[in-house]
Image (cartoon, helix red, strand yellow):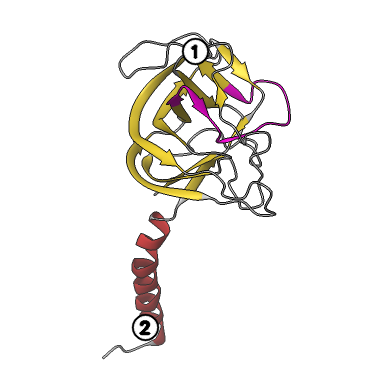
Amino acid sequence: MFKNAKTITALAVAVAALVGGPATASAATSFGADVEPNVQPSNAGSPHKCNGFEGKTCTWVLNDAYGAPGHEKAPKDGELKQIKLIAGAPGSFKLQLVKVNNKQKAKVVTQGPRIRYQGQTNPNANTYKVEKFDVSVPVHEGEQLAIKTKQTSTLRCSSGGDNTLLYNPALKVGNTLQSLGSDDGCWMLIEGVIK
C-alpha cells in the first residue's frame, strides 16, 4: 500500500503523536504542601484557633508550602480535582482559592465545598493518614489554597514566621482586597491536584 519506508515512518510518528497528545495534556499537577505519609502533623493533635481572632471564623491562606518551597501558587489554569491533607484531629473547613498581592492583601476568587476530615487514629504512628477529597473547582494560575474555619489541625507546627496568613473577617467571594490580619508559624498540610 505504501511505497517507501519514509511514508510508513511518518505515519507511525503521526499516530504516536495523536495517541500520546491527550495523555500528556491531562497530566496532573500539584501545588501547596508536599503531603506524604511521612509528614507528621506535629503539635496539631488538638485544633488551633485563628491566631489573634480566637472564637472567630477566619481565612487561613497557605503562604509557605511545606516540603515544596516555591509551590504555594497554582502553576496553571485548570480544574482543581482533588484536595489531599494531613490532620492531627477531626474537623472541617470551607475550601477557598485566593489571590494574594505583594502587600499580602487578599481576596477570594472561588469558594469550594465544605470538607470534613477525620485526622489521625494513632497520633504516635510512624506514618500518617493522608486524606483525599475529590472536588471540582476552577483554578487560575497564581491562586493559593485557603480554608475558611474557626480552627484547624491540618497543620505542622514546629517553626515561626508567616507560613500561614490569617484574614479576619473571613474572606468572602465578591469582596475587594482585604488587609492581612495576622499570621501563623504553622504550615498548612494541604495539597491541591489540578487536571
> On screen, 105 above or below 95?
above
- The residue that appears at 68% across and 31% down in the rendered structure is 157
Neighbour tally class for label 2: few under 14, some 14-19, many 20 plus, Cα within 10 Å: few
Q: Which of the 4 image quadrants contains residue 158?
A: top right
State which region is magenta. Answer: 148-164
Residues at marks 1 and 2 touching, judged by CB atoms closer than 8 Å: no
- Going from N to C along the chain, the mark reached first, 1 or 2, is 2
**Quadrant occupied by the N terminus:** bottom left
Residue 116 lies left or right of residue 100; in this view the side is left
Q: Which of the 4 image quadrants contains residue 33?
A: top right
- Please state which of the two labelled residues, at mark 1 or mark 2, is closer to the viewer: 1
Q: CA distance from mark 1 to mark 2?
A: 58 Å
Secondary structure state at the residue bearing disc 1: loop
Q: Which mark is residue 105?
A: 1
Q: In the image, is residue 152 part of the stretch drawn in magenta?
A: yes
Per the image, the residue denoted by label 2 is 8
> Quick one: 99 or 158, which is closer to the camera?
158
Say which amino acid is labelled 2: Ile
Task: Report x, y in % for residue 132.
Answer: 45, 49
> On screen, 161 above or below 192?
above
- The residue that appears at 35% across and 17% down in the rendered structure is 172
Task: Report x, y in % for residue 84.
Answer: 49, 46
Say which amino acid is labelled 1: Lys
> How many marks are shown on the rendered structure?
2
- The residue that appears at 30% across and 16% down in the rendered structure is 174
